[in-house]
Amino acid sequence: MAIGLIIIGDEILSGKRQDKHLPQVISALNARGLQLDWAEYVGDNRERITATLQRSFASGDIVFSTGGIGATPDDHTRQCAAAALNLPLELHTEAKTLIQQRVLDMAAEAGKTVDLNSPDHLQRLKMGEFPQGAALIPNPYNKIPGFAIRQHYFVPGFPVMAWPMIEWVLDTHYSHLFHQQARAEKAVLVYEAIESVLTPLMEALEAEFPLIKVFSLPSVGTTTQRRHIELGVKGDPEQVEAAFIKMLAGLDHFHSEYVPVPLSSDA
C-alpha cells in the first residue's frame, strides 16, 4: 500500500515559508518501518486542489494532506475534498463541540465571557465543516480537529499541530503495517565514474535480483571531495547482500576506484 503526502499552500510555493513537512513525514514513516512513495505541492487554487484530490482518492493510497483546512478565504481543502468525492459539506457534531470548547477555554484564560452565537464565533464553526461521513483527527495542541475520509488524512499546515496528528493516525490506524517488510541498503562511492558506463551493470543487477532497486546519485564534487557517484542497492536484505557482491565484482571489472558508504538498514 503506497503512502502519499500533499502539501498545500501558496506560502510554500512562493518561498514565503519553507516546507518542513516533507522531511518530518519521511522521518516519522521511517521510524515505523514505512516509507513515503510520493509527494505533491499544490497552491491555494481550488480547481487544482480538487483535481489533485480526485486523483489521489482514486489511487487507493494512504494520503496525508497538510494545510488549507481553516475558515479564511484562502483555505480551500475542506471544500475541495468534498467536491472531489461529490459529497456535501456538513458541520460535524463533535467538531462543533470541540471548537466551541476551544473558544470558551480561550475566553476563560483571558477572564472574559463569550457569546457562542456571535458572527465571529459562528465563522469559527466553518473549521468543523467536513465532507459528509468524515471522521475526526484529534488535535492535541488546540483541540481544533482535522478530518479523515477514504484513507486520506487532512491536518493543519502548522507543524506543531500537523506532526502529532499524523503520528496519531499512523499509530492508531496503521500499526499493523509497521516493520512488515525488512529492508537493507548498501552502497559505495565510485570516484570519477561515468553513469552511462555503469548503467548496464545496474540494469543487470535489477534483472537478476527482482527484490532490490539500484540507485545512482552523482556528485560533481567539492573542494574537499572528488567527483563521484554513490552507487548502491536497496530492498530485500538477502538479495541486497548478493547483489552488492555482484556490483563490487562489476566495479572491479571496470577497475573502478571506490570506498564503502556506511550500511543503512531497517529490519
Image: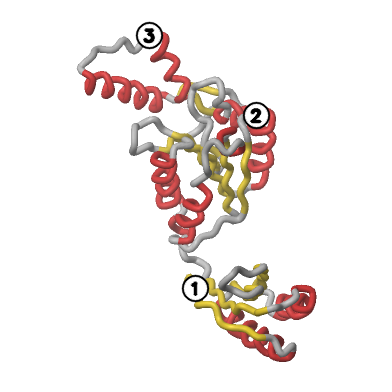
CA distance separating discs 2 and 1: 40 Å
Which residue ends up furthest to the front in the rendered image?
Answer: 223
Q: Which residue is mark 2?
A: 45
Local SS, label 3: loop
The residue shown at (35%, 32%) is 143
Q: Nearer the viewer, residue 205 or 192?
A: 192
Q: Is residue 261 among what the camera can see? A: yes
CA distance separating discs 3 and 1: 56 Å
Which label was assigned to residue 48? none
Q: Is residue 98 above or below residue 5?
A: above
In x, y percent, where is residue 226? 63, 75
Local SS, label 1: strand
The amino acid beneath tag 1 is: Ser
Q: Earlier in the sequence, mark 3 or mark 1?
A: 3
Q: Is residue 41 above or below residue 115?
A: below
Which label was assigned to residue 118? 3
Q: Are marks 3 and 1 in contact (CB under 8 Å)?
A: no
Q: Earlier in the sequence, mark 3 or mark 2?
A: 2
The residue shown at (45%, 15%) is 123
Q: Are marks 2 and 1 in contact (CB under 8 Å)?
A: no
In x, y percent, where is residue 31? 44, 61
Quarter where residue 1 is shown: bottom right
Q: Is residue 27 above or below residue 267?
A: above
Circle 3: is it few (<14), some (14-19), or many (20+) Cα within 10 Å? few
In x, y percent, where is residue 63? 56, 46
Q: Is residue 211 among what the camera can see? A: no
Which label was assigned to residue 265? 1
The residue shown at (42%, 45%) is 163
The residue shown at (38%, 37%) is 138
The amino acid beneath tag 2 is: Asn
CA distance separating discs 3 and 2: 30 Å
Quarter where residue 58 is shown: top right
